[in-house]
Image: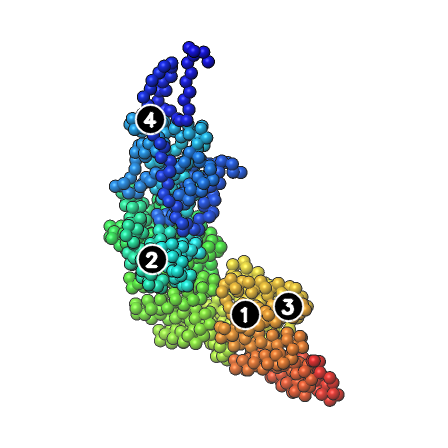
Amino acid sequence: MGADATGNAVTGGVFFHAVVQGRNITVQLPAPVTPALCGLPVPSATFTGRDGELRTVLELLDPAGSAPAVPVSAVSGLAGVGKTELAVHVADAARDRGWFPGGVLFEDFHGFDDARRVEPGTALGRLLRALGVPDEHIPADVSERTRLYASVLSAFAGQGRRVLVVLDNVSSAEQVRPLLPRDSATGVVITSRHTLGELEARLIELPVLGAEAAVAMLGGRLRAARGPADRRVGDHPRDALRITELCGRLPLAVQIAAALLADDPARPLAALADDLEGARTRLDEMSYHTLAVRAAFDLSYARLERLEPAQTRLFRLITLNPGPEVSTGAAAVLAGQDVRTTRRQLEALARAHLIERGGAYGRWRMHDLVRLHTEEQQHKRAEADGGPAAHTRLLEHYLATALAAAGRMDPVGCSARHGSAPLDGEFRDRTEALSWLDAEFPNLMGAVTGAGEAHASLAMRLTAAVSGFLELRRHTDEWVTLAECAVRAAEHLADRAATAHLLTQLGRALQLSRRFEGAVGAHRRATAAFRAHGDRHGEGTALLNLGGPLHDMHRYAEAMNAYRTAGDIFQEFGNWYGVSRALINLGSTLQELARFEEAIDTCRTAVALCRELGDSQGEGFALGNLGVALRGAHRHDEAVVACRDAARICHERDDRHGEAKAQNIVVLSLERLGRHEEALAAGLAARATFRDLRDRHGEGHALSAVGTALRALGRPEEAVDAQRTAVALLHGIGDAHGEGKALTNLAATLLECRRYGPALDHCREAETLLRRVGDRHSEATAMVVRGAALHGAGRFTDAAAVQQRAAEIFCGISDRHSQSVALANFRDSRHAARHGARPDGP
């Protein structure tokens, strides 16, 4: 360069004002401004349960990732759910990986706190200063600040110094929109209680913690505060889980619980759990110095009430819904407004994370702690909101819709019970009605149990309306609870007729719960009440139901008398639906008495009557009972056809329990026909269904049948395992009759394995149980197996005596086929005894 040449070089900075250049220039520069790009809060050492969300946001920010980089991620969720903590961990991890060498900017907007709320212009000024722009160069106008901010970030990115911006606790898109960079290099993570769907951002909704993660967080925070010697969480995992569940697995609440425990090392977890148990005081307990769940919710609620009073009223009113989820239609009933307006309001509340979307479209739920907070507000504003009238409207809506669903589900039965099927176009078909009942069942149950004296009549009618559904779905314990509530309501109203009807429902529910003595008592009370009231038709209904638990208690003569009397009464009134039900049940009792031909005739009559009435439900019941009777008569081909027809009808009606029963009945007949693989498949399918339905009685019988099929397929060890499990299940629920039959099947399998000693023991135990319950046919069957075991063990004389006694029992109950089997075994054992045959066993 020559002597007169001028050369200037400016490096190592980003300049947004005039740069003076020339020959022999003297410039007095101001003191350098250092960018403040490390204002990130310290990440928590006990961060847990967010691996999936952390990975998702990092993948979006990764400049070298396989997925295209997304500059803006908006993390939303309920107050206290841990949005800020997630954002901090994302920023910390991204910085450590070198993705943002320019550093991290962090700004808390306090979007829901009116006293501390940061406006966009203020935030831009702070961030520009943090980027090293002097105050004198920061314009006053917000739009000019936005342009300068974007230019600075772009310049940093151009120099290979990409910046990550974390905009925390934002209340709306407008609050943050001016701070979104215009280049594709700068990364942005936004957190908000609202879903900011109007932004061009990847939306990530943060749920509450999983159960294990919540307990891990509680334990981690406690150990961090008190050291590894504090083992309260590890030593008492159930209490820890109880605390976190009462906290709703909300990280803020779990953090407060940990702080309370850390404050007092002697405080047992169970004591804190007990303190949190009370719903009315739980939010008061969830407070520690400046941390409080109620305070966090207060901010969201206050902002909603100020900006959206109509939404706030709906928000308060939906706490009156008795179950965990409310449909859009039910919420509209509560608010007394149209469904479209309600849907839009609910969607807005969901975007604000004050409510959540439920298990299906059009259903909504509320976090437990939010619900407690909102219930407090609802109590304060009940009169202004019209709360009592809204609650009554909701209960009446549930009753009317439940009646319509019952009419679609069982139109013949509804017509027989109520005189007409209450169909009003609410549901297009039975499937739709059942879907509504499945979804709304928790609400219907809550409506009855929480009705109180003011709505006692409604509780009675609603229980009656859902009885068919409860039986179909085998919600037996819940049915007992509802029926007891309804009976108390009827007694409170001194409504003797309703009391009698509801006692029959209570008795039926108790029977299905296998509480037979209680069921008999309820039905006898109902019979007496109908008789005293002069209601002969009602008396027939009570007697029909009384026969059920009497049958299950093996008091067959009493059961048959009840069924026959009920059938005669129904015939007097021309109630052919009732007659068909009496015949169905009578056929079942006859086959238990081994009067198989009578049972077959009775069941065929019931099938024909149900078909004439168009009663597919009754037809399925009758065909199942017919299958049992045909199997008992050793007409196995016909039994398979009847049972499969029953299973098909039950499947079409979505009656899983009835379908499983039919599958279970068919197993033995398929076995007798040598169709062992089909038998095993049917038994396994039945077992799976019973297990899903939590019906241990059905599962036990299905497992016993599965064992029989496995034995026939040459898989004896598997058969023994299945049958032992069946015995244990049936013993556990006190089903002596089923246990006796399962023991007989187990003994037969052990007999095939030549394990004669255990087989003999199980047979003797089975005979004792079956004799006690009065099942002579099954007792004789167990004796046949015992005789075979004695024969195999070489005790031929004893074997002959046992087989002879079994043949006498079969003769007495007119089972010629089984009698001939026992007599053939008797002759074999007697011949072996006379000719000194050698035993089969070792």
Task: Check residue 710 in the rendering and tell me which mark sits there, or answer none.
Answer: 3
Secondary structure found at label 3: helix
Which residue is disc 2 drawn over? 262
**Vertical comparison of 87 with 17: above or below:** below
Q: Nearer the viewer, mark 2 or mark 4?
A: 2
Residue lying at 43% horizontally and 71% vertically, measured from the top left: 510
Image quadrant holding the C terminus, namely bottom right
Mark closest to the chain's N terminus, 2 or 3: 2
Residue found at the far front of this picture: 3
Which residue is disc 1 drawn over? 700
- Looking at numbered disc 1 in the image, what kind of residue is underneath it? Gly
Q: Quadrant of residue 13?
A: top left
CA separation, marks 1 and 3? 15 Å
**Left or right, residue 234 beside residue 822:** left
Secondary structure found at label 1: helix
Residue lying at 36% horizontally and 62% vertically, measured from the top left: 269
Q: Nearer the viewer, mark 1 or mark 4?
A: 4
Mark closest to the chain's N terminus, 4 or 3: 4
Q: Residues within 10 Å of mark 2 (few under 14, many from 20)?
A: some
CA separation, marks 4 and 3? 82 Å
CA separation, marks 2 and 4? 50 Å
Percent across and percent down for residue 567 are 48, 73
CA separation, marks 1 and 4? 77 Å
Mark closest to the chain's N terminus, 2 or 4: 4
Task: Check residue 144 in the rendering and tell me which mark sits there, or answer none.
Answer: 4
- Looking at numbered disc 4 in the image, what kind of residue is underneath it? Glu
The answer to whether the residue labelled 1 contacts the one labelled 3, judged by CB atoms less than 8 Å apart, is no
The answer to whether the residue labelled 1 contacts the one labelled 2, judged by CB atoms less than 8 Å apart, is no
Percent across and percent down for residue 441 are 41, 58
> Is residue 569 in view?
no
Task: Check residue 100 in the rendering and tell me which mark sits there, or answer none.
Answer: none
Q: Residues within 10 Å of mark 3 (few under 14, many from 20)?
A: many
